[in-house]
Image (cartoon, helix red, strand yellow):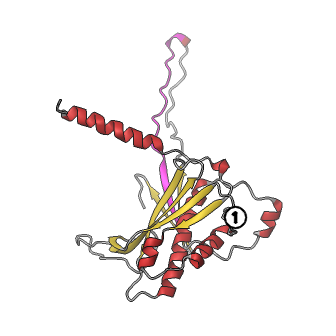
Amino acid sequence: MKTLTPIHILALIGLLSGINTSRAQPLDKQAIKAIDLQLARQTLVKWGLTDTNALRAAVIGNLSQWRFPLPAGNGQTYTHTLTVEIGDSKYDQTPVGFSFSSGNSDPRAPGFQKAQVIPIQCRLSANANPNQHEELDMTFSAPSSPINTHKLQESLIENISGVCFDLLDSLKFLPPPTAAQAAATISKPTWMPSVQVETVPVPQPQPKLENPPAATASPATATATPPPATQEPRQQLIIHNQGTPMILKFGHERR
């Protein structure tokens, strides 16, 4: 049997990677009409939350206030599924936003800004083609011991609603509201995400030439001025919370 050389192995890995990457497809946003919400029960059962109906109904109620199509009735034909995966509590980086669990403040310590957190993933996939999907992962502070089941359920409702809201809001698939919908939403919804993370590009000002070159008298000797080098667009991360939003700008002028 012919032995595979390192070059063959790298080529095989690249081929397999290309196959896996090509399977993921972007969502057809115009096809999103009715979304079903599915909650993973394994972790919830570990925490003593055996009845997920109330939790699921509360999350659907929160997201529906923002016109996201999550009908709660039975017998509905769904075009997409919103799947929520809740991981086990782990010792990791502190969550995005503001938390009482800030972790160790010593930058030289192994536990610098680390705490017990719970990862939550929200994944939207097309029922007709599961390869079309988008997902978002976020972490939240883990409940302290002993665990209060009622408070844990309230916390999970808030956190799951927040992750799924950020995912659905980032897709920008909702059509503009009708006049009736706009009139019905004059007052703010009763639920708002405690932490909403938004990434927006920051427009860069065009550089100005201090001493522009004088026009040449002879067209034959005129030379074309090379276009300025394109700069990498800078990103602005906005963390919306119930108080004043915190804005972080990324680039050579970091804040």
Q: Which residue is mark 1?
A: 75
Label 1: which secondary element: loop
Q: Amino acid at mark 1?
A: Gly
Dividing the picture into quarters, in which one does residue 112 lie?
A: bottom left
Magenta run includes residue 111? no
In the image, the segment drawn in magenta is: 220-239
Q: Residue at x 68, y 61 (%)?
A: 69
Work out whether residue 82 can be spotted: yes
Q: Is residue 104 above or below residue 79?
A: below
| For residue 236, side relative to residue 46 (left or right) | right
Q: Residue at x 22, y 32 (%)?
A: 7
Q: Label 1 neighbourhood size at 10 Å, few (<14), some (14-19), many (20+)?
A: few
Given residues 183 and 132, the one toward you in this image is 132
Q: Main secondary structure of the magenta part?
A: loop
| For residue 36, side relative to residue 159 (left or right) | right
Given residues 209 and 35, the one toward you in this image is 35
